[in-house]
Amino acid sequence: AGMVIVAINPVRQFKVARDTERQTHILALMNAVNANMSEHSGIFTCNGVVQDLPTTTLKLISSDQDGLDIRSCLVPAYLGELPQDPKTGRAYNTVTGYSTGYTLGISSTTGSLVLEAQGEVDARITVGR
């Protein structure tokens, strides 16, 4: 049955697989951010310095771009490396920087931490805590 489903619409199946990978990535990122905050009494800390998390969602990208660079806050203590969007992200490179394809911020309505990804089957993939 699985072979028939893949044969019927392989493009959609690849999109579903990438969305599943995105969900896994944002859960790993959320766990890493929460672990950082747990270690520092509920305060997000980067290299010993308190870092305020944005009240609007910002892209997780290298500091030479407009967004939020938290790589040094999470790698290698909480993650081996920042995950990259399976379709658009690129591996971290010290010369060209990185763009994960994911966003992070504090929800203005709930006050909770929110990580998001742009999905291919589901429009938005969101995890909030």
Image (tube, helix red, strand yellow):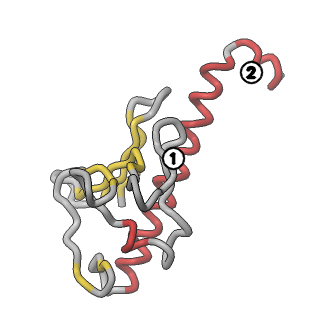
Residue at the far front: name it. Answer: 95
Toward the viewer: 35 or 86? 86
Q: Quadrant of the image for the C terminus?
A: bottom left
Q: Which mark is residue 23?
A: 1
Does 1 appear above or below 88?
A: above
Q: Quadrant of residue 114?
A: bottom left
Where, quadrant-wise, is the N terminus in this rendering? top right
Name the residue: 47% across, 72% down. 75
Q: Secondary structure at mark 2?
A: helix
Left or right: 124 with respect to 121? left
Query: Residue 70's spot in the image, x, y percent?
Result: 34, 66
Q: Residue at x 63, y 28 (%)?
A: 14
Q: Residue 88 appears at what percent x and percent y?
A: 46, 37
Q: Nearer the viewer, residue 18 or 99?
A: 99
Q: Is residue 117 left or right of residue 113?
A: right
When asked about the image quadrant of residue 34, the answer is bottom left
Q: Which amino acid type is marked by label 1?
A: Gln
Estimate how packed mark 1 is, as few (under 14), some (14 to 19) or many (20 or more) residues with alpha carbons within 10 Å: some
Marks 2/1 in contact by CB < 8 Å: the verdict is no
Q: Residue at x 75, y 19 (%)?
A: 5
Residue name at image x 33 percent, y 57 percent: 62
Q: In the image, 103: left or right of 100?
A: left
Does 120 sit above or below residue 66? above
Q: Amino acid at mark 2?
A: Val
In the picture, the disc for residue 48 is none
At mark 1, the secondary structure is helix
Q: Which residue bears the numbered disc 2?
A: 6
Asked which quadrant contains residue 128, the reply is: bottom left
